Image: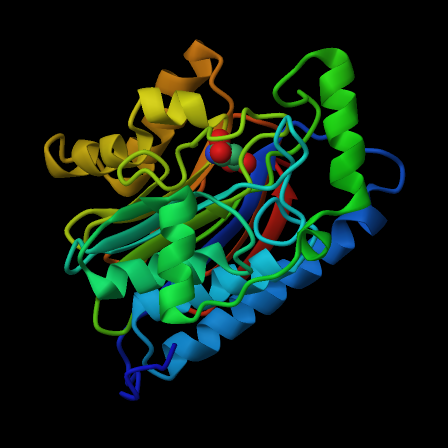
Amino acid sequence: MASNGKPSGRRKFALALHGGAGMLRRGPNATGTELPYRVIMEQALDHGWILLEQGACACDCVAEVIKILEAAPLFNAGRGSVLTSDGRIEMDAAIMCGKTHRAGAVAAVEGVRHPIELAYRILLDDRFVLLSGNGARAFAEQVGIDFADPEWFITEHRIQELSAAQSAGEITLDHEKFGTVGAVALDCDGNLAAGTSTGGLTNKSFGRVGDSPLIGCGTYADNETCAVSCTGYGEHFIRHVVAHDLASRMRYGKASLHEAADAIIYQRLAPAKALGGLIAIDRKGNISMPFNTNALFRATRDTKGKTTVAIFDS
Ligand code: ASP
């Protein structure tokens, strides 16, 4: 999407992205295995940062960052998404603008190369918030969104994961990372946006919808409080309405971003054995990224331009 063309001047902007939370084993070759993830996260961060520097709005930035992550087969979004119990890929995505509270989302959509782009087109169209399945597909055809064949999306790794999950009789595997992707941004006009894109959980039922496309659960943005993108076992994030709960703690409870984000992840979700994490940003550009798994694939660039790229908790 095009930037608004305004120079960024001295206004502050900031960006954070994630590539999913998870419980990962750290083998002897961990550094080598982590490298490709770090490279893609940094590429996405750099691309988003250039857009913000050029004066792009937070929504454009978030959508473009997520498109890079969706195209990389390493993450559980777009290409490389996990498989349903019947061996297909059904994807969820959402994007929300913190200034206008307009939002666009897709659920259980098949064959769309960039579900976040489709979600963004729904936001811009502004008649609906969430389209699912065949309805989402029909809308995508109308607006000329790119499709790809199943072979483009399905990787060998995901086929093996599905077969392991099915042998164990599980919806997902404990040692596996969830792998959803997301981004949150503050643009030079002081506006916030959040987006999330995912293939969901390995071996999920067809038609299952997770937290990511549900506004207030896995994705939320509000200029007065924060922008949030979640990752984890979606059913818990839906039950706890996590993203909106974070914003509400700030709005009504006057909590800081860090206090609110930590309280949800460590005091609310962890005791309920609800695994996952989130990334959140407020209008001052503070960034919070708590997680109760041992890893969260994440990258940030703060208002001073300081970059961090990390996977594990320490
Ligand atoms: N939250 C996603 C879902 O349940 C999964 C993930 O975060 O990887 O669909």
- Please state which of residues 258 and 42 is positioned toward the viewer in this rendering: 42
Question: Residue visible at 85% across and 33% down?
Answer: 27
Q: x, y percentage for residue 28?
A: 89, 37
Point out the residue furthest to the left here: 252
Q: Is residue 188 visible?
A: yes
Question: Residue visible at 74% across and 13% down?
Answer: 168
User: Looking at the rendering, which quadrant does residue 73 occupy?
Assistant: bottom right
Q: Is residue 147 left or right of residue 83?
A: left
Query: Exactly how many numbered labels are in the figure?
Result: 0
Q: x, y percentage for residue 250?
A: 18, 37
Point out the residue furthest to the right here: 28
- Please state which of residues 113 and 174 is positioned toward the viewer in this rendering: 113
Q: Is residue 67 left or right of residue 247?
A: right
* Quadrant where the N terminus is found in the figure: bottom left
- Say if 223 sits above or below 232 in the image: below
Q: x, y percentage for residue 35?
A: 76, 55
- Please state which of residues 207 and 170 is positioned toward the viewer in this rendering: 207
Q: x, y percentage for residue 30?
A: 82, 42
Question: Residue visible at 72% across and 21% down?
Answer: 165
Q: Is residue 236 left or right of residue 162?
A: left
Scheme of image coloration? rainbow
- Say if 148 sits above or below 6 in the image: above
* Quadrant where the C terminus is found in the figure: top right
Q: Is residue 290 visible?
A: no
User: Looking at the rendering, which quadrant does residue 161 occupy?
Assistant: top right
Question: Residue visible at 64% across and 43% down?
Answer: 311
- Say if 16 sits above or below 188 in the image: above
User: Looking at the rendering, which quadrant does residue 90 occupy?
Assistant: top right
